[in-house]
Amino acid sequence: MSAPAHQGTGSERLRHIWRSRNLAARALWPLAAVYGALSGLQRKLYVWGWKKAAHPGIPTIVVGNVIAGGAGKTPVTLATVAHLQSRGFTPGIISRGYGRSTNDCREATSESLPQEVGDEPLLMARASGVPVFVARQRIDAARALLAAYPATNVLVCDDGLQHHALARDIEICVFNNEGIGNGWLLPAGPLREAWPRPVTAALYSAARPPSGTPASIPCFHVQRQLAPYAITRSGQRVPLQNLQSQPLHALAAIARPEDFFAMLRAQSLALASTEALPDHYNFESWKRPSGERMQVICTEKDAAKLWQQCPDALAVPLHLHVDQGYFDLLDKHPCLSSPS
């Protein structure tokens, strides 16, 4: 099935432009120069002390990226939280809650509506079992979380590498398999800020670290793969091999939907049709494809919203394997020497 015009084709064209320094990218370069000047000034205001960053008062890790679009921050956040728990820490997660219809500071629980807290915070709340709070100002989320859960002794911020108002101890930059693309800033390239920039570590899923990364930045490889099962709305697991003999309608409202479709096909699933929707799509106007009824299959991130319209949809979780060296680096960091 061909994707309608509103289903993310614009972002695909941009990603094509961002792969090289072609004529279209060069035409956008003056805008990139303006963007770079404005974002650089914003950062300098904190460096010069004209704006003050606030620290939550306990070890704080920011997992973010310097590229536009999906890089896999949320799976890295969950893997980081799970490792901290294995070491005896009591972590909490803070996030902006991108795509939600609310603007206040609130907790995201497993019973929250995705429209109220955002799809990624809801996924993290369900998958991690730790407190998750959202707010436009991450320090507000941190303070609310600590007030409600005072035993929390480490915070992990999902996204926020460019949110300079939150002071942090550790910065993790995540890259997808396209690295830094053509190396230019938005909108001429995919970069939100120039790379390289100081970070505690960089995680990458390509064959090699991002171009231009200095030896002073520790780099660790991550491998993403689908779980061998899908889950129903009630939480039951359905082995993917049981779906190999039936036609499927696969959809994804993520930054890189084609990655999800490719991973499904790699599991020998027959995708009769695919539907690429805009990242954080709310599904309120979504209609099930007409004609022959096919099993709908989606990402775990999209499931909570899609299940409101399509209760029988199946969601496939994403599993992440991170080089052990990343966790060793965290363990050796002074602020994480031991749970307090």
Image (cartoon, grey):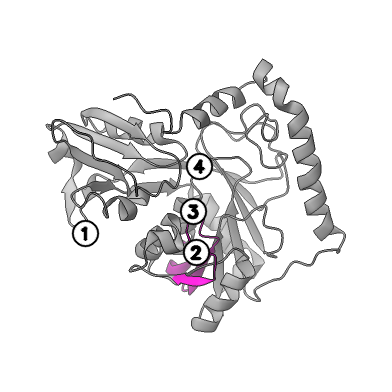
- The magenta stretch is 83-107
Across and down, in percent, residue 218 comes to 63, 46
Task: Say what amino acid the circle numbered 2 marks.
Answer: Thr
Q: Residue at x 29, y 34 (%)?
A: 264
Q: Quadrant of the N terminus?
A: top left
Q: Is residue 323 left or right of residue 241?
A: right
| Mark nearer the N terminus (2 vs 4) | 4
Q: Is residue 173 left or right of residue 251?
A: right
Image coordinates of residue 201 in percent, x first then y, are 62, 50
Q: Residue at label 1?
A: 235
- Amino acid type at image mark 4: Gly
- Position of 302 compared to 191: left or right? left
**Callout 2–callout 1 Cβ contact below 8 Å:** no
In this figure, which residue is indicated by the disc labeled 4? 70
Q: CA distance from mark 1 to mark 3?
A: 24 Å
Q: Magenta span has 241?
A: no
Q: Secondary structure at mark 2?
A: loop
Type of the residue with mark 3: Gly
Which numbered disc, 2 or 1, marks the residue that appears first in the sequence? 2
Q: Residues within 10 Å of mark 4 (few under 14, many from 20)?
A: some
- Reading the image, the residue beneath label 3 is 99
Kind of element beneath mark 1: loop
Q: Alpha carbon of mark 4 to alpha carbon of mark 1: how far?
A: 26 Å
Q: Nearer the viewer, residue 22 or 282?
A: 282
Q: Secondary structure at mark 4?
A: loop
Quadrant for residue 24, please give it.
top right
Q: Residue furthest top?
A: 23
- Gap in angstroms between the C-alphas marked 2 and 3: 9 Å
Q: Residue at x 22, y 47 (%)?
A: 313
Q: Secondary structure at mark 3?
A: loop
Residue that badge 2 annotates: 102
